[in-house]
Amino acid sequence: MFNIVLVCPRIPQNTGSIGRMCFNAGFKLHIIKPCVFDLSQRAVRRAGLDYWDKLEPVVWENLEAFLASHLDEKERFFFATTKSKKPYFEASFRVGDFLFFGSESYGLPLDLMGLNPQNAITIPMRPCGRSLNLATSVGIISYEALRQNFSPSFYFGSGK
């Protein structure tokens, strides 16, 4: 299972869509506060459909609390950012990795990315583009991690 980590998300519909994707992909969703919305908001649940109740996201009060619990795994932290020149498809993902995504307005904190700077990855875009939608970005990178570690029996059953 991969871990999707949203650091201070700001748009409830994105968070709901990401939750829906995490449930269907079998990924664990971590949400790091502060959020500018309540996770029980209708917009989150509407975008997450009926998957939101089954998802069981882990909500952290702040980044420090998350890191206190997972800092020993920092070698497997990957940071999606526009501040990197390393395309996400050049990263080697393993099951259990943590894929970090920043808020729609501010991205990820530089000191966080400093924990493992060689794992800062980006989605290639034209020079005139600033960024992609957060839910789109999470989907692109998450499914590359899944592609690299795909287990047909997990997703399609044993065929019996």
Image (tube, helix red, strand yellow):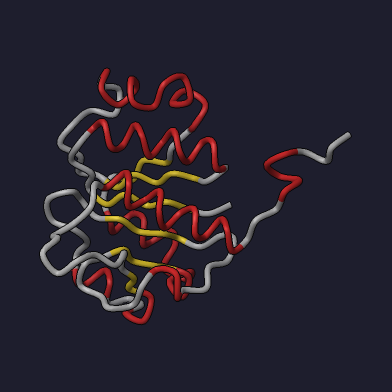
Instruction: Using the image as rendered, state which of residue 115 and residue 62 is in the foreground.
Output: 115
Residue in the picture at 41% in, 59% down: 99
Q: Name the spot of residue 97 as percent of width and height, x first.
A: 51, 63
Q: Is residue 53 left or right of residue 40?
A: right
Q: Residue at x 20, y 50 (%)?
A: 103
Left or right: residue 141 compared with residue 117: right
Number of numbered callouts drawn: 0
Q: Tell me residue 85's x, y (percent).
A: 27, 78
Q: Residue at x 33, y 20 (%)?
A: 46
Direction bottom: furthest residue: 118
From this view, report whether residue 118 is shown above or below residue 82: below
116 up-or-down from 98: above or below: below
In the image, is 24 to the left or to the right of 108? right
Closest to the observer, 91 or 1: 91
Image quadrant occupied by the C terminus = top right
- 6 vs 127, left or right, is right
Residue 95's spot in the image, x, y percent?
59, 61
- Determine whether 17 is above or below 134 in the image: above
**Which residue is at the front of the view, 121 or 53?**
121
Q: Determine which quarter of the picture holds residue 13.
A: top left
Q: Answer with the quarter of the image where residue 120 lies.
A: bottom left
Residue drawn 36% across and 34% down? Answer: 17
